[in-house]
Amino acid sequence: MAAKKLNIPPYLSALSIMLFVIVLVFLLIVGKSLLIPLFLGGFFAILFTPLSNWLEKFKTPRTLSCFVSLLLMTLLVGGLISFIIANVASFTNDFDDVTGRIGHYAEQVDGWTKSNLQSDYELRNKVNTDYLKNILLENSSSISGFALKTVGSLSGVVLIPVFMFFFLLYRDHLTKMMIMIYRDRDPAIVKMRITSLTKVIQHYIVGVGKVMIILAILYIIAYSALGIKHAIFFAVLGAVLNIIPYVGPFIGILLPVLYSFLTKDSLFYPAAVLVTYQIIQMVEGNFLTPKIVGGNVNLNAFITFIGLLIGGTIWGVAGMVLVIPTMAILREIFDLSEETKPFAFLMGEEKTNEKEKPTTKDENSE
């Protein structure tokens, strides 16, 4: 005897969806300090899964392969942070004649206003050179604090490698759990989708890494051509911060502009840094990211924009970083069930190359 399908009125379905969204947002906000390290640990685990699989081909115990992956991730992240801190510490040695340089700029502005506007604003006497100097130093020294706020807290920094290790250790167990959830589907298909999902995230992270490397090279060429000291540091920092939408590029340009303003003899250099940075950002936004990253996650621009707004509102900077790969995961999960496939279609990119061809019947009726 076939089971009867429960028919729920449309208004109750809409109400249940609204309640689910409210509860989900509440849990995301309350559990921020735990969920952010959990998600970051999961993405690091996905990124290093190929390395663990490769080590296990040579009969390496899974625990040891997970530990090697964890150690490599710690060395990479720790090396990047050490590089940034070492360069920030050397900034103060380049500010010997800041007061005289800013005073010279103020005198030039006073001369122009006096000759063209017939008024003397006496900026040379009002400008606070120590304040401008502290802006650069405070923004530079707050990079580590900014990163700490991104992951939530100091305990979040400790939890990320712990979660990564356990995700790598129990990855087969998690796959079997997903197969059990979708037991009405062919297990081989579910396993294939999970494998495809991990590849999507890996390709996304690798794509972001490629964009960062290209941006770093372009920034190094531009800053070196302008004669800006610490060109490699500013280039690497700008490329890394580029993964944070809106906020990252602003911080990435603020430091080199202020630094060139305080250490160079002409206003041409900060202006040139700003112009070249904007040109490179246009290349990245209109060519690099859509071509290298956009095709990997297969999310349309509207859903990506909405996701960035929601992620930034709930989790701040960490939410904007994590929301794109998270939505890519959700799209693949939605595609596993017939009931949720419309949501996967909504989140995906429209395939313009696959246009519907008119049938013979339609052609004859015309």
Image (spheres, helix red, strand yellow):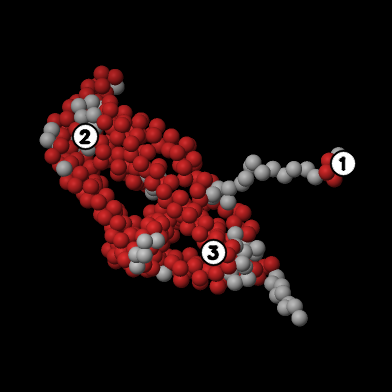
Disc 2 is placed on an element classified as loop
Q: Does label 3 or label 1 sit earlier along the sequence?
A: 3
Compute the Cα span from label 1 to label 2.
Answer: 72 Å
Q: Quadrant location of residue 345?
A: bottom right
In the rendered image, residue 70, in percent from the top left (x then y), is placed at 31, 61
| Residue 312, visible in the rendered structure | no
Q: Quadrant location of residue 225?
A: top left
**Residue at 21% across, 34% down:** 229
Other residues around mark 2 within 10 Å, as few (<14) / some (14–19) / many (≥20): some
The amino acid on which the numbered mark 2 sits, given as a three-letter code, is Lys
Compute the Cα span from label 3 to label 1.
Answer: 45 Å
The amino acid on which the numbered mark 3 sits, given as a three-letter code, is Lys
| Residue 25, visible in the rendered structure | yes
Foreground pick, 11 / 364 = 364
Other residues around mark 1 within 10 Å, as few (<14) / some (14–19) / many (≥20): few
Disc 3 is placed on an element classified as helix
Is 8 rendered above or below residue 365?
A: below
Label 3 sits on residue: 191
Picture disc at residue 320: none
Foreground pick, 65 / 232 = 65
Count the labels in the image: 3
Taking the view exactly as shown, the residue that stands out farthest to the top is 115
Q: Does label 2 or label 3 sit earlier along the sequence?
A: 3
Give the side of residue 159 with respect to residue 345, left or right: left
In which quadrant will I find the C terminus? top right
Q: Does label 1 or label 2 sit earlier along the sequence?
A: 2
Picture disc at residue 364: 1
In which quadrant will I find the N terminus? bottom right
